[in-house]
């Protein structure tokens, strides 16, 4: 009897759990007939990255012997160069514009696809440290001469990237004017070549131009939460997204010093929408 009662109790708990999950995705009211006729949206939007995790330049130490090249970089004496941990936010500020097209699949589920353009505004930062006097020669690009241990500054140039994506939205909460949703997307992002000026802190007038990252087609995915406020066929929307972007391609010229990893970012999105 005890086993029989325990089995039925487990079934009862499973049923309650299933109903609870279903209730999350069940709207608080059925959409009005007028809303059912409106099945598509166009959403121009602006985005800004507010936080990122992951190293655009990973920390590492490269040891050189005199006059022996290491991936196109040569020092005239034995020394070490340390790459400093640099986040995407340390190297760039990011702003974007996009247009997203959506269509209702059911009353609670929508599909979307979009295009996005992003402007990367370069910053200056301490990228490397050398542990003693040496001349650093970048094959075919120029050289820097350090008279003592010190920092090597990096000044990133502006760059751009654009992408396409597609995904799905689910609306667990819907009202006459205000709705909340969760979203997810997968896409491709085409990046520019990324270059920089590098110079010694002790001699800022002595700089050379170096290619850091090659142009590459990157895979990315994002998920987030959002809200819509409807005003007839028009409305406003806001979202917070969590975005993962594949690692960039380091150029051969700096691969002896630079390695990178995928970036996890948090963009905030604000836009308008037209429903039809």
Image: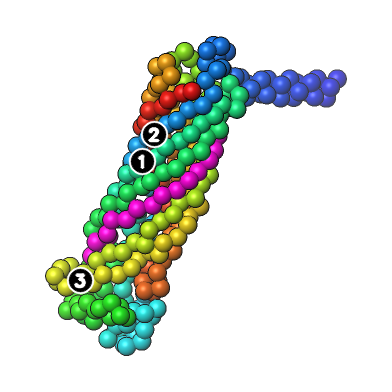
Tell me whether the residue at label 2 lies in contact with that at label 1, contact meaning CB atoms closer than 8 angstroms: yes
Q: Residue at x 26, y 70 (%)?
A: 209
* Left or right, 146 with reference to 58: left
**Magenta span: helix, strand or loop, mainly?**
strand
- Which span of residues is magenta-colored? 152-168
What residue is disc 1 on?
A: 97
Q: Residue furthest bottom?
A: 67
Q: Residue at x 23, y 58 (%)?
A: 124
What residue is disc 3 on?
A: 207
Q: Give 248 or 165, whichever is nearer the viewer.
A: 165
Q: Residue furthest right?
A: 1
Residue 123 figure quarter: bottom left
At label 1, counting other C-alpha atoms closer than 10 Å, the crowd grade (few under 14, some 14-19, many 20 or more) is: some
> Is 160 above or below relative to 68?
above
Q: Using the image, tell me which numbered label, if any, was put on residue 44.
A: 2
- Residue 130, percent across and down? 26, 73
Mark closest to the chain's N terminus, 3 or 2: 2
* Label 3 residue SS: strand
At label 3, counting other C-alpha atoms closer than 10 Å, the crowd grade (few under 14, some 14-19, many 20 or more) is: some
> Is 185 above or below relative to 182?
below
Residue 157 magenta-drawn? Answer: yes
- Residue 121, percent across and down? 28, 52
Mark closest to the chain's N terminus, 3 or 1: 1
Q: How is the image coloured?
A: rainbow
Q: Using the image, tell me which numbered label, if any, was put on residue 221.
A: none
Q: Which numbered mark, 3 or 1, is in the foreground of this view?
A: 1
């Amino acid at each position: 009897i005890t086993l029989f009662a325990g089995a039925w109790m487990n079934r009862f708990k499973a049923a309650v759990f299933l109903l609870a999950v279903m209730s999350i995705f069940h709207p608080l009211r059925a959409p009005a007939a007028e809303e059912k006729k409106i099945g598509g949206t166009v959403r121009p939007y602006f985005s800004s990255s507010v936080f990122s995790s992951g190293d655009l330049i990973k920390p590492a130490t490269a040891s050189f012997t005199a006059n022996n090249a290491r991936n196109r970089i040569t020092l005239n004496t034995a020394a070490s160069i340390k790459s400093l941990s640099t986040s995407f936010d340390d190297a760039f500020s990011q702003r974007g514009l996009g247009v997203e097209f959506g269509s209702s699949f059911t009353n609670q589920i929508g599909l979307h696809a979009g295009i996005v353009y992003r402007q990367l505004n370069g910053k200056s930062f301490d990228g490397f440290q050398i542990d003693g006097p040496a001349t650093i020669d970048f094959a075919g690009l120029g050289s820097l001469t350090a008279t003592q241990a010190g920092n090597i500054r990096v000044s990133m140039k502006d760059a751009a990237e654009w992408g396409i994506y597609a995904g799905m939205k689910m609306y667990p909460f819907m009202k006459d004017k205000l709705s909340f949703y969760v979203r997810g997307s997968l896409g491709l992002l085409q990046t520019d070549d990324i270059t920089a000026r590098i110079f010694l802190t002790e001699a800022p007038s002595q700089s050379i131009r170096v290619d850091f990252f090659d142009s590459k087609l990157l895979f990315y995915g994002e998920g987030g939460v959002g809200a819509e406020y409807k005003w007839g066929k028009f409305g406003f929307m806001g979202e917070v997204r969590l975005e993962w972007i594949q690692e960039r391609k380091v150029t051969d010229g700096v691969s002896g010093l630079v390695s990178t990893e995928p970036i996890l970012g948090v963009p905030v999105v604000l836009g308008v929408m037209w429903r039809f």
